[in-house]
Image: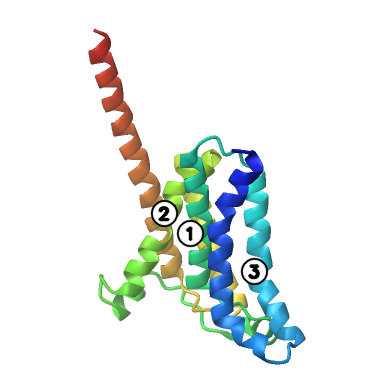
Amino acid sequence: MSDLLKKILIVIPFFLLVIEIVNARFGYLLHNELKVTPILNIFLNTVPLFIFVLFDVLTRKQESTFQMVIQASFYIYVMSVFYLTLFPMSLENFLTNTFWLRSINLEPFNIFRDYHFFDSQIVGNFIMLFPLGIYLHFLYRKFTTKVSSLVFIFFVSFSIEVFQLVFSAGSTDIDDIMLNTVGGYLGYWCFKVSSTIYHKKSDKTFNALIK
């Protein structure tokens, strides 16, 4: 299989998902007179993701089917997080948003007074970046040290909150950052510990066979 075909197969699921989501939100525009602002909103919600995915897949090597599956699933995961946290971003909200006047919760653990521990708001924020901590080991290995992984996950969560603030796409809450970061870091450690145990068992099995 050629490298180009591998890359095409990897991005197809992502593009299909984007088309489905965008059509569900903006499909009605196809039946009306197209205006500049809705078109710009469509571009705002798609082009940055397209650029990221295309650049990422073109700069990576796909040496095995497993790597292809990991990359394809990662792009779907990125789109899913974007859909849950920021979609649809609106140019009108950005231009008219007095985000400096919006209420921002900077009081830690305030969320636990508003929701019970297993509420979807808490659980959802906790598990949202859990897969990211795992993907780091496969796709961003330079961020797999104890400190760099924590900083990377925190930066992703912080960036989401900033975009939510600027585009009025959701509430800005320090508890969201804390839950996202802890969940993502737990994912990092779960994979790291599991991988270490697996390799130790594999080494013991190998040593037993050669004795």
Question: Against 20, is 33 above or below?
Answer: below
Q: Is residue 168 visible?
A: no
Question: Which numbered tag is attached to residue 16?
Answer: none
Residue type at numbered disc 2: Pro
Tell me if mark 3 has few (under 14), some (14-19) or many (20+) residues whose alpha carbon lies within 10 angstroms of its own: some
**What color scheme is it?**
rainbow
Mark 1 → mark 2, Cα distance in angstroms: 8 Å
| Nearest the eye: 26 or 157 | 26
Q: Where in the figure is residue 29, as x and y percent of width and height?
A: 65, 87
Please state, as top left, top right, bottom left or bottom right, where the C terminus lies in the image: top left
Question: Which numbered tag is attached to residue 77?
Answer: 1
Q: Is residue 123 left or right of residue 91?
A: left
Q: Where in the figure is residue 44, as x and y percent of width and height?
A: 68, 73
Q: Please state the total of marks drawn on the protein image.
A: 3
Q: Which of marks 1 and 3 precedes in the sequence?
A: 3
Question: Against 48, is 57 above or below?
Answer: above
Identify the secondary structure beneath mark 2.
Answer: helix
Look at the numbered discs 3 and 1 and tell me whether their residues touch, using CB distance below 8 Å: no
Mark 2 → mark 3, Cα distance in angstroms: 22 Å
Look at the numbered discs 1 and 2 and tell me whether their residues touch, using CB distance below 8 Å: yes
- Disc 2 marks which residue? 131
Question: Which numbered tag is attached to residue 46?
Answer: 3
Mark 3 → mark 1, Cα distance in angstroms: 15 Å
Question: Against 125, is 110 above or below?
Answer: below
Tell me if mark 2 has few (under 14), some (14-19) or many (20+) residues whose alpha carbon lies within 10 angstroms of its own: some
Q: Residue at x 31, y 80 (%)?
A: 114
For the view shown, which residue lies furthest in the front direction?
1
